[in-house]
Image (spheres, rainbow, N blue to C red):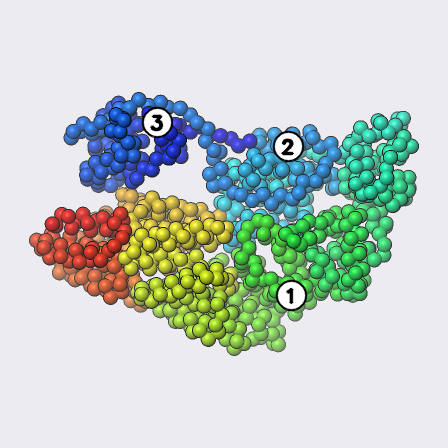
């Protein structure tokens, strides 16, 4: 069960205040406290019936800020209204004129049980397979959950086929309610590459894998989650699974891990639960049916035999024979089930005779193998011997598949010289004989060999030409599958939706390994690697995209130069390199080469995607004029092609590019056109792993704020976050949250901005998004400055800019440099800030990021006004230039800021009437946003100039 936390509750009258949850309720209904009212209430409740001075309240509630007493009175008034003071004679806060305030109502303090620490950001998954019936595991079902609760990390260790997976699934179902459905079942049996352990978990979690080692991203994501993580079939990956589990166990205190393996992981925190084989009747005693059926191994045998259709009466004559078979099978559940299913065909005595004959051969196996493994191998050997020739052929061919496969795949890969109806008949028979496991996925049935069965089948030698033909057919099938289904991946959410496709990616990996191996098919490997690019990018498997794209390009021959395969491989290496290593000349060269091939071949969809990637490349590099050129080229391509996906991409790119250039009217036109398309069709444009939909909503929010519609901007930003959350793609959500944080920072809503920035940073950390993490650190530094800790904020912002410059990720550096300059101004270092802004102005003039110029000129004016020896006329000129340029761009929000600063500047020099007229003209154009910081500041200044 979850560990509860004590939450302090303060009660007074009909109110209850939860300090941990920051929630005030009145008769169980939540009370909304605006602004600083909540912090004031907490401060007053900390010392009831004691006068707290105004100065002390200002220090506690507005730490580090210079705030007038009027603000304190305003929020005290709001607090009294929220508490309903005065109604029904209620009295909570008493004012001591000129001194301070006292909370006078009687209070009571108590503890409540809060949700467990990890429940707030609870992870919802529960991809647990169906629970299977078990025999005699009641003790384990009780003990393992108890150990998990006490130790958080349990490994079920036992022989192959003993029932570890079945037990783990049963434990998962037992604990489903305790974890509120937050369980993730990870089947590692289909993974052969040790480096992919983290990738498997990350993909099922829906995390973007940005490097070859996904563990740090997973750890960051799970750090505040409460979840049961079941790692099934670990024995062939002991070392990487041990390292992964140890990292998660150490860093994520609310994550519980249940593993299954044939040997212990031997890592920190692991609690080993040894799962014995089922108890069998002893030898040398008089065994009646009544006595024998009390043993679990016999119970399993009888239950499975009858479930398979056998008419088993289980007489005293049969009892010792069954007991002997169970002993010979060492009580291994899988082996017993395989034997029991033969009873329908051969009877108890016939099955025992065949078992004895085949198991006798197994003792000739290697003596170094554990006895139970030798016994299980003998059981599989015997089971294989009972198959027909056709079933044997099909079973051996099925071993080419890794994990789950479909009937279509079986027919295409295994049907070289076998008729479709014969393959289907063989599959049915193999399922009936427990050689193939089935699992429904939606409306499609999925199949897989048990891991022990597949390992056994792989050991059986087949003709070299047949083996090669099988591998070629396997690679060809999954190449064609990628061509047909590659685009679907980008629309899949996490967990169950991806599970149906996940085994296919494992088969793609296996085919790639074979194609580029010593005796593989290089040409087919190139085609397969090229076809995989879209899927790898859509699923953010960037390291794999880079690896196989590079292998494919190295292997290109003269005939493939300029082909569609080269186009996709160049795009794959360019996009993956950009995301993993930052912008570089090599990235630009790869993208340009791919774009040139797409243009030459008339591949319009790829051309659009590559134009967009070049747009992103140059935007991140801070080359905004080049960015606009690529956006316009994409727009022209959309008009020529008429493709709806390209149109949405073009509207998105051009809308954001026009915003950067200062054409806000054009930006709004393009982005609202995109919203119109999406509102009718809901069709996005996922090309090369990029979907602009939600980022475009944020871009529209930014344009609306600049236009002078701060409330509409906030609504759009919230809409973007909500829509992105519904999709479940955490990497995309991280970007959307970052954009929403900017909008609320511009509005002056520091609490909302902090919320979005913190969430964005956490997701960026979980997904290994290095540049976005650096941006998050800079945003946090901005908020630190805005909240009054200027020195710390300036230091943090300087440090945060270094990795951004190193990655050539210059998209937001102008904004950060302006904030840094204002921080320096607050520290009395206006000269240093002025140098910073002058450099930014030069850079903006060169790069084309013109929408920032009005704000840069305003900030320069403030710095000049505070710089000793600087011309006041020059400062005023900067303010006026800012206003004029903002007016030309229709950037009313920038215009209002500049007009407010200029009006204050003019008032200081005695021109109060001119200052009031100037500011009133700009202020009067606003019809909304009167609760935002800029409009409130303008209104306050106007009131003072009246």
In the rendered image, is residue 432 in sight?
yes
Mark 2 closeness class: few <14, some 14–19, many ≥20 residues within 10 Å: many
In the rendered image, is residue 361 in sight?
no
Horizontal side of 72 relative to 812 (left or right) equals left
Give the label on residue 298, or none. Answer: none
In this view, 553 is above or below 907: below
Mark 3 closeness class: few <14, some 14–19, many ≥20 residues within 10 Å: few
Mark 1 closeness class: few <14, some 14–19, many ≥20 residues within 10 Å: some
Residue picked out by circle 1: 480
Residue at image position (85%, 27%) is 290
**Residue 167 figure quarter:** top right
- Mark 2 vs mark 1, CA separation in Å: 45 Å
**Residue 884 figure quarter:** bottom left
* Earlier sequence position, callout 2 versus callout 1: 2
Q: Position of residue 588 (x, y in %)?
A: 46, 68
Give the label on residue 14, or none. Answer: 3
In this view, 793 is above or below 872: above
Residue picked out by circle 2: 144
* Earlier sequence position, callout 1 versus callout 3: 3
Residue at image position (30%, 63%) is 851
In this view, 452 is above or below 422: above
Residue at image position (33%, 54%) is 712
Q: Position of residue 261 (x, y in %)?
A: 68, 41
Q: Foreground mark, 2 or 1? A: 1
**Residue 636 figure quarter:** bottom left
């Amino acid at each position: 069960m979850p560990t509860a936390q004590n939450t302090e509750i303060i009660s007074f009258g009909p109110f209850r205040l939860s300090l941990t949850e920051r929630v005030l309720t009145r008769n169980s209904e939540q009370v909304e406290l605006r602004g600083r009212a909540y912090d004031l209430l907490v401060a007053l409740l900390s010392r009831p019936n004691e006068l707290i001075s105004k100065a002390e309240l200002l220090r506690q509630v507005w730490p580090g800020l210079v705030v007038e007493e009027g603000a304190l009175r305003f929020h005290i008034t709001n607090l009294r209204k929220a508490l309903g003071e005065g109604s029904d004679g209620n009295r909570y806060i008493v004012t001591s004129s000129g001194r301070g305030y006292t909370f006078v109502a009687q209070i009571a303090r108590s503890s409540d049980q809060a949700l467990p620490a990890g429940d707030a950001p609870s992870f919802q998954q529960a991809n647990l397979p169906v629970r299977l019936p078990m025999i005699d595991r009641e003790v384990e079902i009780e003990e393992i959950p108890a150990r998990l609760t006490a130790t958080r990390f349990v490994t079920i260790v036992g022989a192959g086929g003993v029932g570890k997976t079945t037990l783990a699934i049963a434990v998962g179902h037992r604990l489903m309610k305790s974890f509120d459905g937050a369980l993730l079942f990870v089947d590692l049996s289909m993974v052969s590459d040790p480096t992919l352990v983290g990738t498997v978990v990350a993909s099922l979690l829906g995390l973007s894998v940005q490097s070859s080692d996904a563990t740090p991203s997973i750890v960051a994501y799970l750090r505040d989650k409460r979840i049961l993580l079941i790692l099934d079939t670990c024995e062939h990956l002991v070392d990487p699974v041990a390292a992964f589990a140890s990292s998660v166990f150490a860093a994520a205190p609310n994550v519980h891990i249940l593993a299954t393996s044939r040997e212990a992981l031997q890592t920190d925190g692991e609690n080993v639960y040894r799962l014995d084989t089922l108890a069998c009747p002893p030898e040398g005693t008089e065994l009646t049916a009544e006595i024998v059926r009390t043993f679990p191994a016999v119970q399993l045998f009888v239950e499975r035999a009858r479930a398979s259709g056998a008419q088993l009466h289980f007489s005293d004559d049969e009892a010792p024979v069954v007991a002997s078979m169970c002993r010979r099978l060492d009580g291994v559940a899988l082996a017993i089930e395989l034997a029991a299913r033969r009873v329908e065909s051969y009877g108890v005595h016939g099955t025992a005779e065949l078992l004895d004959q085949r198991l006798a051969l197994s003792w000739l196996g290697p003596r170094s193998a554990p006895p139970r493994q030798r016994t299980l191998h003998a059981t599989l050997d015997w089971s294989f011997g009972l198959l027909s020739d056709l079933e044997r052929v099909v079973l051996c061919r099925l071993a080419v598949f890794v994990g789950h496969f479909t009937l279509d795949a079986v027919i295409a890969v295994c049907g070289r010289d076998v008729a479709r109806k014969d393959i289907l008949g063989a599959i049915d028979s193999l399922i009936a004989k427990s050689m193939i496991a089935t699992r429904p996925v939606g409306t499609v049935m999925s199949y897989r060999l048990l891991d022990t069965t597949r390992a056994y089948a792989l050991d059986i030698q087949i003709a070299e030409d047949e083996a090669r033909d099988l591998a070629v057919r396997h690679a060809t099938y999954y190449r064609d599958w990628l061509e047909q289904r590659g685009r679907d991946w980008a629309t899949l959410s996490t967990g169950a939706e991806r599970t149906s496709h996940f085994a296919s990616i494992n088969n793609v990996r296996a085919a790639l390994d074979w194609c580029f191996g010593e005796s593989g098919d290089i040409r087919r490997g190139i085609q397969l690697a090229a076809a995989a690019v879209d899927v790898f990018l859509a699923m953010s498997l960037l390291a794999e995209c880079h690896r196989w794209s590079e292998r494919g390009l190295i292997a290109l021959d003269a005939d493939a130069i300029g082909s569609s395969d080269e186009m996709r491989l160049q795009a794959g290496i360019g996009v993956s390199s950009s995301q993993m290593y930052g912008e570089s000349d090599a990235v630009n060269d790869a993208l340009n080469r791919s774009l040139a091939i797409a243009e030459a071949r008339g591949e319009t969809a790829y051309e659009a995607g590559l134009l967009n990637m070049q747009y992103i490349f140059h935007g991140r590099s801070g080359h905004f004029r080049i960015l606009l050129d690529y956006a316009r080229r994409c727009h022209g391509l959309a008009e020529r092609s008429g493709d709806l996906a390209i149109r949405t991409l073009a509207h998105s790119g051009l809308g954001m590019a026009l915003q950067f250039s200062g054409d806000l009217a054009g930006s709004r036109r393009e982005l609202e056109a995109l919203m119109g398309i999406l509102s009718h069709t809901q069709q996005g444009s996922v090309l090369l792993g990029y979907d602009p939909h939600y980022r475009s909503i944020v871009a529209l929010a930014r344009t609306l704020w600049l236009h002078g519609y701060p409330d509409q901007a906030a609504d759009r930003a919230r809409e973007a976050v909500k829509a992105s959350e519904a999709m479940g793609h955490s990497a995309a959500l991280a970007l959307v949250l970052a954009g929403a944080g900017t909008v609320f920072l511009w509005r002056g809503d520091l609490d909302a901005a902090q919320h979005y920035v913190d969430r964005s940073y956490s997701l960026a950390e979980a997904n290994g998004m290095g540049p976005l993490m650096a941006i998050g650190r800079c945003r946090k530094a901005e908020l630190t400055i805005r909240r009054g800790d200027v020195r710390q904020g300036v230091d943090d912002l300087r440090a945060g800019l270094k990795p951004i410059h190193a990655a050539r990720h210059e998209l937001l550096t102008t904004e950060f440099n302006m904030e840094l300059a204002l921080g320096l101004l607050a520290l009395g270092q206006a000269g240093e800030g002025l140098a910073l802004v002058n450099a930014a102005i030069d850079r903006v003039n060169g790069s084309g990021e013109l929408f920032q110029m009005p704000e840069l000129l305003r900030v320069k004016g403030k710095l000049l006004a505070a710089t000793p020896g600087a011309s006041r006329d020059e400062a005023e000129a900067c303010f006026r230039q800012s206003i004029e340029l903002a007016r030309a761009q229709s950037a009313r929000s920038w215009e209002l800021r500049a007009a407010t600063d200029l009006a204050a500047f003019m008032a200081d020099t005695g021109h109060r009437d001119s200052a009031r007229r100037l500011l009133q003209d700009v202020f009067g154009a606003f019809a909304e946003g009167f609760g935002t910081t800029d409009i409130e500041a303008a209104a306050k200044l106007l009131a003072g100039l009246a």
